[in-house]
Image (cartoon, helix red, strand yellow):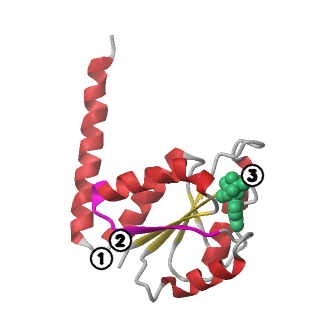
Amino acid sequence: MAQVAIVMGSTSDWPAMQKTTVLLDELGVTYEKHIISAHRMPQHLQVFGQQAQDKGLKAIIAGAGGAAHLPGMLAANTLVPVIGVPMQSHALNGIDSLLSIVQMPAGIPVATVAIGEAGAKNAALLAAQIIALQDNTILEALTTFRARQTQQSVDSEDDLI
Ligand SMILES: Nc1c(C(=O)O)ncn1[C@@H]1O[C@H](COP(=O)(O)O)[C@@H](O)[C@H]1O
């Protein structure tokens, strides 16, 4: 049983969304991956959302680009927290994706992260932090991750010439 679902509107989102899996693997968070488009697969989306809680999912990471309705429509169909990742689009550089995801009407929240790969990485960390509220193993993995990240930043000073 996976703790997190990574959902994206298209396989073209995978290069950025794959960044989530690297971090989830590192932290020991289990996940499943799906292509589900609110536009192209509306019935699939509804069924997936309605089954998410019973499957035991603790968070859903949803990446979409352009008119990015996927995260909001998933959130409308479940009480599992949804983290939306705006994909970098060609036409508008991801501003379209960002605004589509972040500007949810009051009542149906989507936790929105930054555009592209940085957002995908933070989505994984945020999902892990949600799970860590009730899972000490993931809490320890996050603590180690933070400590290592801090040390790398401290050490990076030595690279300055
Ligand atoms: N935003 C959505 C949705 C949706 O929100 O339902 N479904 C696909 N897409 C997005 O369309 C972009 C182009 O997709 P294609 O590359 O398949 O044409 C992708 O970034 C995808 O997330």
Q: Is residue 139 left or right of residue 30?
A: left
The kind of residue tagged 3 is Asp
- Magenta stretch: give its range: 26-36
Q: Which residue is drawn at 30% across and 18% down?
A: 159
Would you call the spot at circle 3 few (<14 residues within 10 Å), some (14-19), or many (20 or more)? some
* 20 relative to 86 in the view: left or right: left
98 up-or-down from 37: above or below: above
Residue named by callout 1: 134
Q: Few, some or many C-alpha atoms within 10 Å of disc 2 (few <14, some 14-19, many ≥20)?
A: many
Picture coordinates of residue 102, whole percent (x, y): 66, 60
| Left or right: 41 in relation to 156 | right
Q: Is residue 54 visible?
A: yes
In this view, 70 is above or below 75: above
Residue 32 part of the magenta segment: yes
Q: Could you tell me which secondary element the residue under label 1 belongs to?
A: loop
Which quadrant of the figure shows ligand 1? bottom right
Q: In this view, does 100 lie to the left or right of 153?
A: right
Q: Which of marks 1 and 3 is nearer the N terminus?
A: 3
- Please, what is the three-letter code of the amino acid marked with disc 1? Gln
Residue 35, x across and y down, in percent: 58, 66
- Contact (Cβ within 8 Å) of mark 2 with mark 1: yes
Determine the secondary structure under disc 3. helix
Residue 96: mark: 3
